Image (cartoon, rainbow, N blue to C red):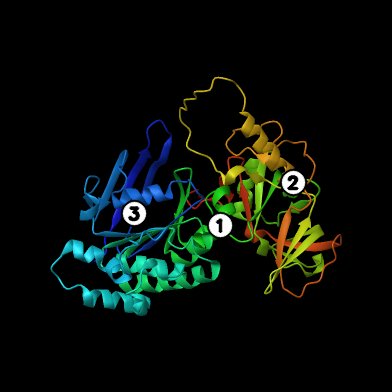
Amino acid sequence: MSRAISLRSVSKRYERANRAVDRFSLDIEPGEFVVLLGPSGCGKSTVLRMIAGLEDITEGELLLDGEYANHIPPRERAMAMVFQNFALYPTMTNRENIGFPLRLENPRADSGPQIEATARMLGIEDVLDRYPSQLSGGERQRVAMGRAISRRPSVFLMDEPLSNLDAKLRNHLRAEIAQLTAELGVTTVYVTHDQAEAMSLGDRVAVMRGGILQQVSTPRATYALPANVFVAAFIGTPRINLLQAVVYAPLDGRMSIDLGKQRLPLPEPLSTDHQLLRIQQGRQIIVGLRSEATRIAPPSQARPGEVALTGIVEHMEYQGHEALVHFNTGSQPAVVADLESPRPQGPVRRRRTRSGPSVLTRLKKRAVAHVSGPVVALDDPEPRPGTMTAERPSVAASDLVVRTGPDVRLRTGAQVPLLVDLAHLYVFDHHGRRICPAPTDLPGLDA
């Protein structure tokens, strides 16, 4: 039987530390597969442990099937957890490891048939009488999953179960997990920092950063309509192209987006999304272009909604089934420091009274700027000196990555015509919030 899980403004604070999880709210339907995705240290494992009862909830409520469950002991929650490091008992055989929770629940019952059925489901019948040390990493993870499945829990909690495995085995087990959870119909909460796992496994993906929930949506919607620049940069391979820009909207001329040395003229009549960009006139913005939004072709082959751009080839990456071409378009890349987006504003207590950033912070910014250009100050109401300014600093060598077919042959240093599909253009304000395509909760201009 599956369970519904609801987290209502849940926070976790450790002693003498900031909140590891801050006002996290999420509703999970019975049988749903939800992935918590984010970089290391973002609080996703803490959320999982609070659901399991392994961490106390500092603030907020956990509801299981609509009932308040903050103080229910872990053993009474009917949940099973699969850990990153397998967590198998080395002195027990694999059969004993799988049957251990069954023996705890009912010491006198014969758990043999249930263990055998679980092993057949996972394809590990022939290693039941071995010890964990005699198995490969993939086999040990199957045993760990078997121990969780054998209990027939109402919820699976998986904490990066594939991160210690090699890439080929990870892909194989990922498909097995998807098939297994679909067959069992059990509510599953899966934690990972790997976007490929999240996009291929989850019914919905919950993206986290710094303890804050950024966006919850289907994998397709997360990719196509990122809520902010952090989500856009975290989802997608290769990473989305982020460029500093300024909206140019003269009263008597064509509206365009100034990328520095080139401009993207917006097609007329303006779409609703592009009309909303008028209020950004003269402001610093961030333009996002995924690698498939640009193609190599002359202006004469432009389709409706495509505009011309020119790039100089810096280098190519041959991927077998495709190639990634790195161009220099004369634009300034917008670097998201630590892939961060704005945190909710509130009073912050600082122990250090000395003004200005710390030495480590200054060194970190200098290193990032040396490699990728200046860091965009997404959290500031106005750009700080040395970040996004009207006077553009020196341009990085490569600012645009374009996905092409594997047979394309381009010479390094060649000037190549490009076409940008404005239907796949993202625009973010200097806080990192998406303003184009416009959020669905904004009223239409004709309303």
Name the secondary structure under disc 3. Answer: strand
Which residue occupies 65% across, 59% down?
290
Residue at the disc numbered 3: 27
Residue sitting nearer the eye, 254 or 222: 222
Q: In which quarter of the image is residue 134?
A: bottom left
Q: Which of marks 1 and 3 is nearer the N terminus?
A: 3
Q: What residue type is labelled 1?
A: Ile
Residue sitting nearer the eye, 21 or 118: 118
Residue at the disc numbered 2: 332
Residue 363 locus on image (x, y percent): 67, 35
Which residue occupies 29% across, 63% down?
30
Q: Quadrant of residue 285?
A: top right
Examine the rendering and report whether any part of residue 82 can be seen.
yes
- Mark pair 3, 2: CA separation: 40 Å
**Of circles 1 and 3, which is in front?**
1
Residue at the disc numbered 1: 235
Q: Which of marks 1 and 2 is nearer the N terminus?
A: 1
Q: What residue type is labelled 2?
A: Gln
Residue 338 locus on image (x, y percent): 59, 44
Name the secondary structure under disc 2. Answer: loop
